[in-house]
Amino acid sequence: MSEDLTSREAQETMIVKIRDQMERFGFTRTNPLQDFWSFSFYCEVRIGQPYWAVLARRQGMGNAVDPFMSLAAFKKQVKAGDRLKLIHGPGHNRLGLTRAIVQVRSNDLILEGRSYLTLPRASGFACDGKFVRIANGSEYEPDAHLLYEWIREEAA
């Protein structure tokens, strides 16, 4: 998408345009006397995090990490016992905290202390082998991200 959606007016225009197309094919039929209600679908339109990650990359990111390692390669190399140290997070109260990875699942990492880290799509992920940057921006802060230092477990 080449349109700039940073202004609230541009966001609303795009959302209305898409919602109108989606609702064009929807229907609702009800008859409360016969307890009948049928509808085709409910739709919600929002601008997702991948757009904000691309916008932040275009405007210049803070804490840029060179994407030498893809998300798929990271998922293959990260393992239980590795640790992640939180270096940057918007409004985060746990900066500097290091947590061990307890379990690696397909879309997230289970961290010690009853916590988990959901991995984004590939467009919101960057890893250079030492630092991991996870974009989680929104219309209020497009460049919001988490920056972790990846501390690998020593091979025995």
Image (cartoon, rainbow, N blue to C red):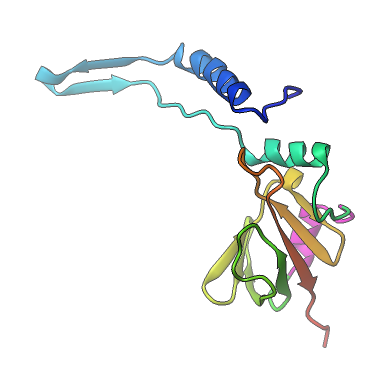
Which of the two residues, 93 or 46, is positioned nearer the viewer here? Answer: 93
Q: Residue at x 77, y 53 (%)?
A: 71
Q: Is residue 99 left or right of residue 68?
A: left
Q: Position of residue 87 (x, y in %)?
A: 73, 67
Q: Position of residue 124 (x, y in %)?
A: 73, 47
Q: Quadrant of the C terminus?
A: bottom right
Which of the two residues, 13 or 133, is positioned nearer the viewer here? Answer: 13
Which of the two residues, 106 or 146, is positioned nearer the viewer here? Answer: 146
Res 100 → quadrant: bottom right
Q: Is residue 57 left or right of residue 47?
A: right
Q: Position of residue 40 (x, y in %)?
A: 38, 21
In the picture as drawn, the residue positioned furthest to the top comes out as 24
Residue 15 is one of the magenta-drawn residues: no
Q: Is residue 39 left or right of residue 15?
A: left
Q: Quadrant of the N terminus?
A: top right
Query: Is 64 drawn above or below residue 24 in the view shown?
Result: below
Res 142 → quadrant: top right
What residue range appears in magenta?
A: 67-78
